[in-house]
Amino acid sequence: MNETFPDLGLKQSDCIELSWVESVLFWTNFPAGTPVNILLSSVPPVLTHLKIKSDYLKNHIPKQDLEFIFKRMIELESVMLTFNSYGGRMAEIPPSEKTFPHRAGNLAKHQYATNWNESRVEAAEKYIWRKGKVW
């Protein structure tokens, strides 16, 4: 990562390596170390509600805007942001080799999400409102 993305300044402690199925547990907020066989249960241990929105980036986000977004995420506590880069390896694959309609002009896809365990309508409105305050 430091060779490919030196500006991130990542340390080993910032990274975790997961198998695909372990990442399912991670992205659904199971505690670290949860056995993957929990996914075989037909009844989820916790009912989690989730709202995700995504969009495409055509321009780089200025550093001060990223700082604002990250500060807002910390304030709101329950909002997640994910970037899927369309550069790097994706840019090396010719369009004739792999059809991907979102390639043209897009640098990345960003997804912002929130999840909650409360089942009241007011809770849903609160968490969805928080997500909307990030982007």
Image (tube, helix red, strand yellow):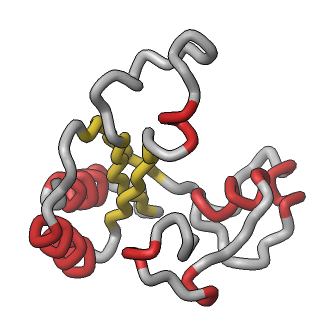
* Front residue (pair 129, 99): 99
Q: Is residue 21 above or below residue 56?
A: below
Image coords of residue 121 (percent x, y): 28, 50
Image coords of residue 60 (percent x, y): 21, 51
Quadrant in which the N terminus is drawn: bottom right
Image coords of residue 48 (percent x, y): 52, 56
User: Which residue is drawn at the image coordinates 36% and 59% (left, top)?
Assistant: 81
* Front residue (pair 114, 12): 12
Instruction: Judge from the rendering whether residue 116 lies leftward or rightward of residue 38; answer left or right.
Output: left
Instruction: Judge from the rendering whether residue 121 lies leftward or rightward of residue 80; answer left or right.
Output: left
Residue 64 appears in which quarter of the rendering?
A: bottom left
User: Which residue is drawn at the image coordinates 37% and 62% (left, top)?
Assistant: 80
Image coords of residue 103 (percent x, y): 40, 25
User: Which residue is drawn at the image coordinates 78% and 53% (left, top)?
Assistant: 21
Instruction: Judge from the rendering whether residue 75 lies leftward or rightward of residue 106; answer left or right.
Output: left
Direction top: furthest residue: 96
Residue 17 appears in which quarter of the rendering?
A: bottom right
User: Which residue is drawn at the image coordinates 22% and 37% (left, top)?
Assistant: 58
* Front residue (pair 63, 91): 91
Q: Is residue 23 above or below residue 75?
A: above
Instruction: Judge from the rendering whether residue 23 lies leftward or rightward of residue 117; answer left or right.
Output: right
